[in-house]
Image (tube, rainbow, N blue to C red):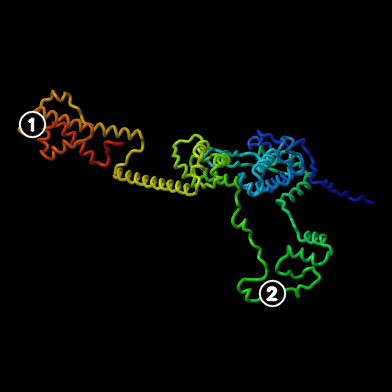
Amino acid sequence: MAAPAAVLIPAPRPSVDDDDVVSVLPATLYVPEASQWLSTSTGRVALDGYSWMQAVHWVAGSGLYKPRRYRSHGPRSFGPTTVRVAQLLAELFPCRPGIEYLVRRTGLSERSVEYHLAMLREAGLLAYVVRGTRVRGEAARASEFARMVPLEFDVALGIRTAGEGTGRRMTGIAEAGRELMAKLAKKAGRKVRRPRAKTSAKALVKVSVEGSAEGSAEAVSAAVSAGGRCTPMEGGSTGTSSAASTSLPPESKLASGMSDCPTPKKSKAKAGGRKLNRVGRRYQLARELTQELDWLRGCSVPRIAWVARQVADAGWSVTEVKGWLHLRGETGRVHRGSGLLAVLLAGAEKVLDTPAKRADAVEQWRGAQEAARRHRIQQVRARAERFDGDWDAPTSRAVQRQVNEAFAAAFRPELPAVAPEAEALPNVSAVAGLEAEEVAQARTEARQKLMLGDSSLITLAVDAMGREAAEELYGAALVRRGLQLASGARSSLMTYGRR
């Protein structure tokens, strides 16, 4: 009798009953601050948010990372809140979350968000690509992270990788880690939501029944009606029929949109906004001041709120503060904005102690703003008229200086080589009947005015007597320079007497 053929049966895969059990556990899981950068990290970059969330759930369930081992403050463990923050990071591409964005999405405080981001970095799940900066006078820049899979995760689940550095990719997994990877995949597919208080109708019924002395159906119906709907639900589990107690509104009320069903009213507090207390008004005024005053840009809002606490408590608005600062005087260069604001606001609430005084200060400030605006318009218009033409003024200061020097050298009056007393005077007795001393005095006066840019004496003499007679009286050199200066003064490209 022949022996039966041998049948090869594969060995069963090892099962993992507990989520927290891993195949190979490292001693600890902690990444120091120097290794929290993409260039120094020992992990690998997660290709998508789904695979990254598997590593996040593994860290949360393994218990290898405990924040209180490395600091005495902050969260005690890597819990659901940290996983919820990680879910938001998994949705971002690139992963560049702002603190304000995470605060708005999670409902946590700013300090709590910073704690959980630090925990994700210390667990090896995040690495800096670009660290955020805060530059004075500019908007804060958020940090950019790379979602990382820790090396301990690959070792614990027996994941085989190919490549080098942070660019390693997964090529396979050991049999011992397949079941745990499947459980982590289910967790990564679910969303961890923010816990909220639940008050169900069953709880109301229980409380009503226990609190009622008789425990009758009236208490049950009252509890159900507290959380019930206006429209009766068909197919209910109550023993009584709903057909007898159902009453439909008349058609007249339905046509007008009215019915007996009470409509939940919106609260006045939500409709009108939250009313700020004293501290809230201080911070609101400080935020508006840092946004509207250029020399307060980049200042700390809490510091400005403390500086402006007196005027904020007195009910001042940002416009009234601007009016008071206008009365105190404008400043050109500010070294420390909060210190200057403290000096300028000292005693302001005592001087402008009534709304009428503050309104007067605001009107003066607005009048000054309008006057400054008109002055700027006039300056622009005058500049456009002055430089209107084919020639464009140079923009370089060095070229402008050279042009001014060239014009000054071309139209500067030249002094005679000899003294006026020693100059030989022509015989002008036949022209004007003047003595030699009077002619010398006239030439001296014309030369002095010409040096100041005034050529009126020479131009009047040329217009009245002619150029030849004017040259006999003042000399040919003075007449030529005077006429050149007069022709240059009529040009739009030259300006004398002012810069």
Q: Residues within 10 Å of mark 1 (few under 14, many from 20)?
A: few
In the rendered structure, which amino acid carries the disc numbered 1? Leu
State the residue position of label 2: 248
- Across and down, in percent, residue 371 comes to 38, 46
Percent from the top left, x then y, of residue 17? 83, 47
Q: At numbered mark 1, what does the secondary structure look like: helix, strand or loop?
A: loop
Residue 314 visible in rendering: yes
Give SS at disc 2.
loop
Q: Tell me the tag on residue 434.
A: 1
Residue 150: name its quadrant: top right
Q: CA distance from mark 2 to mark 1?
A: 124 Å
Q: Nearer the viewer, residue 77 or 259?
A: 259
Three-letter residue code for mark 2? Leu
In the figure, residue 254 lies in which quadrant? bottom right
| Image quarter in which the C terminus is found | top left
Nearest the eye: 345 or 402: 345
Question: Mark 2 or 1 closer to N-term?
Answer: 2
478 versus 198 height, above or below: above
Q: Residue at (79%, 65%) from the top-left corner?
A: 220
The residue positioned farthest toward the left in the image shown: 430
- Residue 223 at what x, y percent from top left? 77, 63
